[in-house]
């Protein structure tokens, strides 16, 4: 559980050897840590309140849900991305501010790196989203959809579109319709 700034920083940095968030100055990095920690604390506090208030009758719960949805949208707009709770593993690195949208059905394992304009979603009507392994780098403008599995150590090139399983570990994915080259 994340209950302090130190615990938050350990969560963001993930396992040993993780490349931490890159922002050019240490002052900006400290401000980003504070903003993200406060936002995460607010989300976890509202999640805890919603668990406690889960016993409320439907008439009282409906306004509470609207308030939580409004708060989530406000934080998403402020930070420039929409990442639901419990989708990403520890050590998630977001290299740039920008439009990052991840479906609530997707699963991203530890030490994943995301660039700007990334969309990880589901096909309409699908019950399950993409599953992305450990140590994956997702370049700018990448689109991943369908119920697919991406293995560990893969690299997505800029503006790659992926809609099929990738079971070869350590591959580079470039272009539309997943042109794959084995990384040497």
Image (spheres, helix red, strand yellow):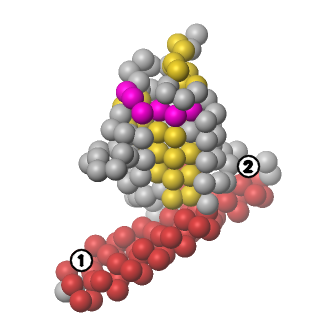
Residue 111 location, x and y as percent? 51, 37
**In this rendering, position of residue 160 left or right of residue 27:** left
Q: Residues within 10 Å of mark 1 (few under 14, many from 20)?
A: few
* Residue at x 24% of width, y 77% of height: 54
- The residue closer to the viewer here, 3 or 130, is 130
Residue 131 location, x and y as percent? 37, 37
- The residue closer to the viewer here, 121 or 25, is 121
Q: Farthest right residue?
A: 25
Disc 2, SS: loop
Q: Tell me how far mark 2 sits from mark 1, CA to CA.
A: 39 Å
Magenta run includes residue 31: no
**Mark number for residue 54?**
1
**In this rendering, position of residue 78 left or right of residue 30:** left
* Residue at x 42% of width, y 33% of height: 163
According to the picture, the residue beneath numbered tag 2 turns out to be 23
Range of the magenta residues?
160-165
Q: Is residue 41 above or below residue 105?
A: below
Magenta run includes residue 162: yes
* Residue at x 36% of width, y 45% of height: 123
């Amino acid at each position: 559980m994340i209950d302090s700034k130190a615990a938050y920083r350990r969560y963001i940095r993930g396992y040993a050897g993780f490349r931490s968030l890159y922002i050019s100055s240490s002052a900006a990095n400290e401000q980003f840590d504070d903003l993200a920690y406060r936002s995460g604390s607010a989300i976890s506090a509202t999640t805890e309140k919603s668990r406690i208030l889960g016993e409320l009758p439907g008439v009282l719960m409906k306004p509470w849900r609207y308030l939580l949805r409004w708060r989530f949208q406000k934080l998403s707009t402020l930070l420039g991305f929409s990442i639901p709770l419990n989708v990403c593993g520890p050590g998630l690195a977001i290299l740039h501010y920008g439009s990052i949208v991840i479906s609530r059905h997707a699963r991203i394992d530890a030490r994943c790196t995301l660039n700007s304009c990334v969309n990880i979603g589901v096909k309409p009507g699908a019950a399950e989203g993409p599953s992305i392994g450990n140590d994956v780098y997702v370049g700018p403008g990448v689109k991943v959809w369908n119920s697919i599995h991406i293995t560990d150590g893969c690299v997505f090139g800029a503006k790659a579109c992926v809609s099929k399983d990738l079971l070869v570990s350590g591959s580079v994915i470039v272009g539309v319709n997943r042109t794959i080259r084995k990384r040497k």
